[in-house]
């Protein structure tokens, strides 16, 4: 196995680790809710601790990666992520759960910025776009984590023991992966200054695209099931059909996105992604039947699959910022979309209806195509594939 392939396998393993930890927590949220006897409103408020912790981590992540290198930060944060997971199962009060959720979000995003910086370096050494395949493994880990969670529930294993098992597996993964991770980061930008400065034109444009992509993702994660329940009016057993359709094409799309990026260029792929999201949601809104809504969310999943990987890949090649800083800047902008998108959908749904909410998300998806088209000259600068 050559050096580049070893690096790719090692970084892929850390992406998988991150995905299975997150999915393990997500799969047991209903159990944690029941154990602590939380209302829907209380749970929703506590879950805001995750994106809050994630946002708080971003400036710190950029500083640490730039100062100490992505390998060291990725390894330490991956170890802490596996150790933080069981704490979620130990929480016995609302306050301790909130603290554990904030900590989980904070460590998770430290790992996210560090491992994406590693991915930028591996991609640089490969000489071609491979970022989407890393994110594809995160999505695949989401399926695995969900399946393991369902099995743990069926076997009546408590969240704490479930999370402890996954935490131990995570420690094993990082033990075998860290040796082959990149020792030094690729410095594509100005290495002076550790503070997060104002994004340049490239990072601002990429951040806006990532914001739209994360908003679409977040809305599908949180509202696709509700849409199928309230608007499509499916039987209880089919409520998750839209979510499964979305996730399946998002995961699959990430494994083939690199091929299409090499063939057509990142900018064209981003434009096509925005068009897919727009028409997919438009189809689900205009024809809210099981067949058309499912087809619509299949298109949305395919459209969102490459937006974040391509955004991170472009950000990592910035000429004005080192990779850790540029990824932190873009992630900060993007996470606001993930944080505020779902509540905005709920607000519009309450005052109008869910179809109006999904129509708004359709236009957010269209903005990805517009931003990619109007900024194509800016976006092509760091992207050799374009």
Image: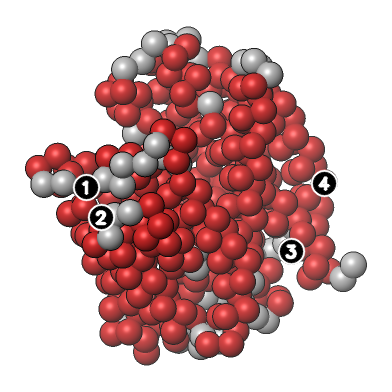
Position of the N terminus, as image quadrant, is bottom right
Secondary structure found at label 2: helix
Q: From the viewer's side, name the closer residue of 332 and 12.
A: 12
Query: Where is residue 121 shown, x and y percent of the image?
Result: 65, 68
Mark 2 highlights which residue? 358
Give the residue at mark 4. Answer: 176
Dot 1: element? helix
How crowded pointer 3 is (Cα within 10 Å; few <14, some 14-19, many 20+) is rated as many
- In whole angstroms, how far apart are the C-alphas of marks 2 and 4? 44 Å
In front: label 2 or label 3: 2
Asked if one can make out residue 340 in the rendered structure from this viewpoint, the answer is no
Q: Secondary structure at mark 3?
A: helix
Specify whether 241 is left or right of 356: right
Q: Would you name the residue on which mark 1 appears?
A: 354
Sequence-first disc among 2 and 4: 4
Q: Is residue 195 above or below residue 187?
A: above
């Amino acid at each position: 196995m050559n050096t580049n392939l070893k690096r790719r396998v090692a970084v892929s393993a850390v992406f998988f680790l991150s995905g299975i930890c997150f999915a393990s927590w997500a799969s047991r949220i209903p159990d944690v809710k029941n154990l602590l006897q939380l209302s829907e409103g209380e749970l929703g408020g506590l879950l805001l601790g995750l994106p809050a912790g994630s946002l708080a981590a971003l400036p710190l992540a950029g500083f640490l990666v730039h100062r100490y290198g992505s390998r060291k930060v990725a390894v330490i944060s991956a170890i802490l992520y596996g150790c933080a997971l069981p704490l979620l199962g130990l929480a016995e009060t609302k306050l301790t759960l909130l603290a554990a959720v904030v900590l989980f979000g904070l460590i998770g995003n430290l790992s996210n910025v560090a491992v994406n910086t590693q991915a930028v370096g591996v991609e640089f050494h490969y000489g071609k776009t491979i970022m989407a395949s890393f994110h594809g493994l995160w999505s695949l880990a989401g399926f695995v984590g969900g399946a393991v969670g369902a099995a743990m529930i069926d076997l009546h294993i408590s969240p704490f023991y479930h999370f402890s098992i996954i935490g131990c597996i995570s420690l094993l993964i990082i033990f075998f992966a860290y040796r082959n991770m990149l020792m030094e980061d690729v410095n594509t930008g100005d290495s002076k200054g550790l503070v997060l400065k104002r994004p340049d034109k490239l990072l601002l444009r990429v951040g806006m695209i990532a914001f739209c992509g994360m908003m679409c993702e977040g809305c599908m994660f949180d509202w696709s099931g509700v849409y199928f329940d309230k608007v499509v009016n499916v039987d209880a057993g089919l409520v998750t059909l839209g979510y499964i359709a979305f996730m399946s094409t998002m995961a699959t799309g990430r494994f083939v996105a690199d091929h299409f990026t090499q063939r057509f260029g990142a900018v064209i792929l981003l434009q096509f992604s925005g068009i897919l999201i727009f028409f997919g949601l438009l189809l689900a809104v205009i024809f809210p039947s099981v067949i058309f809504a499912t087809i619509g969310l299949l298109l949305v999943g395919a459209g969102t699959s490459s937006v974040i990987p391509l955004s991170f890949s472009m950000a990592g090649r910035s000429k004005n910022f080192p990779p850790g800083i540029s990824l932190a800047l873009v992630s900060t902008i993007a996470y606001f979309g993930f944080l505020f998108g779902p509540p905005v959908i709920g607000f519009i749904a309450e005052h109008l209806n869910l179809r109006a909410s999904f129509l708004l998300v359709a236009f957010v998806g269209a903005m990805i195509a517009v931003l990619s088209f109007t900024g194509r000259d800016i976006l092509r600068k760091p992207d050799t594939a374009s």
